[in-house]
Image: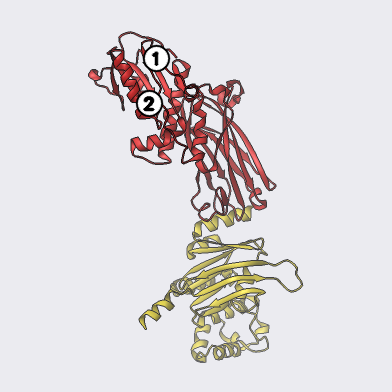
Chain colours: A red, B yellow
Amino acid sequence: MVARFGNGRARWIVLTPSADDEGWRREIARAGAAAGLKTQVERAFSEDAGAGYDDPRRLFITEDAAIALAARPSSVVAIMPEPETAPDAVAEAHNTYAPHSVWHASILLARAAQLAEEHAVITAKDLARRPTMLRLFGDMEIIPPASIAEASRQPAVAAAFAIYRNGDLADASAIPWSEKLFVYDERASRDWPEWGVMDTTGRPRMLVWGPYVALPPGVWRAVMRFGVDEAGARRQYRIDWGTRTACVSEYVTPGQSGTYEITLDWLFEEADAAEMRLILTEGSFMGTVMFQGMSVQRVPRTLISSDQAA
Amino acid sequence: MAAVMEDIAALPGLRVQNLGKTYFGETKPLFTGLNFELARGGRLAILGRNGQGKSTLIKMLGGVLPETEGRIQWLMSSSWPIGFGGGFQGSLSGLDNIKFISRIYDRPYAETLERVDDFAELGSSLKLPVKHYSSGMRARLAFGLSLAIEFDCYLIDELVAVGDARFQQKCQAELFERRAHRSFMMASHDTHLIARHCDRALIIESGKAKIFEEIDEAVEVYTWLRAA
């Protein structure tokens, strides 16, 4: 848990949002003062030469790894406590609400997780072992605050954010993304009998899209599940998986009623919001689609299709 | 009293509830569970591929065919299907048929005759028995009679079936321009005509029917159905 040292620059701690924010900031400030450092919370990158980024006696705390890296720090440590509580913490800190708080929280967590390639990252899994003390930068001793996190009010969001509990994403098992995380065609979902069950009647259109939960770099495998009735099975659908600007697509005409799984891989070059789209590609009269959510899992880079690799 | 008048005006002109049709001897219904309303002044297209029941529905609404199940409730006056010649007595002349219709609808014969003759352009042929008319002449007489009597709502089944291009233009002008504020229900394969003159649509397909509040979307879906 000791980060790299550099010379002539400030140190940075990336503290991702959580229910324990206040306790962590207080403890970091105490440990910083004990090490002779002036601690400051940085909410945005400053172009000002007097910002103190070149002062080795400064310790900055930020929630966004991008700010820390832009400041060319001497060393960086990321602490990611209780990621499931990040959306609520973002909502409170930024006076926003879901789904914006979910999207915002996930990109902060994804950027922090990305630091693991070159910097020290303390994950919720590390903290779950209840260490009595963390030594950072060689001269700072932090006593982890007792967690005050409660069970999430949004179980679907909490399940999706469990992906950030473990720093070693390569070994992570598939993470479920509930159908409740996605956005639906307004008309198709207006009178739906239950969540995710849509009448496809109408012109070609996007039926489901989202969830814009950010993922760290790597090849991410999505397994999307949906059911169709007899009329719905006769229509053609397109499933996209990737980011908002680029994706891989699969066309499918089920032919028979039933439940189907579509597996698609996409290489995220950097931490970015993930988007899945379920698109009805032709006009439909009657027909029901039952979207049942999806799962995502990071897989080895060698499994990516040659199309995207090219 | 004013409140009562407002209430009546707010009522739909037509209410169709759980309407179904199964022809005698058939085991499979042509359509079932049809529900929709038509506002006064509303223009509803009826779209569907051949054999799905568009003309049957128009005839049921016009009182020509009975419903097998459900209910049709008219709260405004409605025409018989425009161009429908099934009500003519073939042995009678065109003039006698006009006289017959005038009496049924309690309209002055002379005025009705003048309007029919002016529109249908059949001249002295009106004196001949209708059974000697060509199909085109029969359709012109039927169309002329349909427009000679004023209704709140007109039922139209494939308008293009009547006469040459000039006569069709005359029909359209008479219906859609001179009667711009009346209600229409129009069954047609002509998507341009539908898109130009209707504001909602009912699509019938495989025994099921659905209302589309956007006419452009209905035309698009219908085009997909025809191409499938």
Residue drawn at (55%, 44%) of the image: A279
Task: Give the image location of residue B35, x and y in percent.
Answer: 57, 68
Residue wearing tag 1: A136
Camera-nearest label, 2 or 1: 1
The one of A132 and A135 positioned closer to us in this rendering: A132
Q: Is residue A290 above or below residue A105?
A: below
Q: Which of disc 1 and disc 2 is earlier in sequence?
A: 2
Residue A241, picture quadrant:
top right
Is any part of residue B120 visible from this angle? no
Other residues around mark 2 within 10 Å, as few (<14) / some (14–19) / many (≥20):
many
Under mark 1, the amino acid is Leu
Q: Is residue A100 above or below residue B139?
A: above
Marking on residue A64:
2
Is any part of residue A41 visible from this angle? yes
Under mark 2, the amino acid is Asp
The one of A186 and B134 positioned closer to us in this rendering: A186
Specify the farthest residue to the left: A50
Secondary structure, mark 1, is: strand
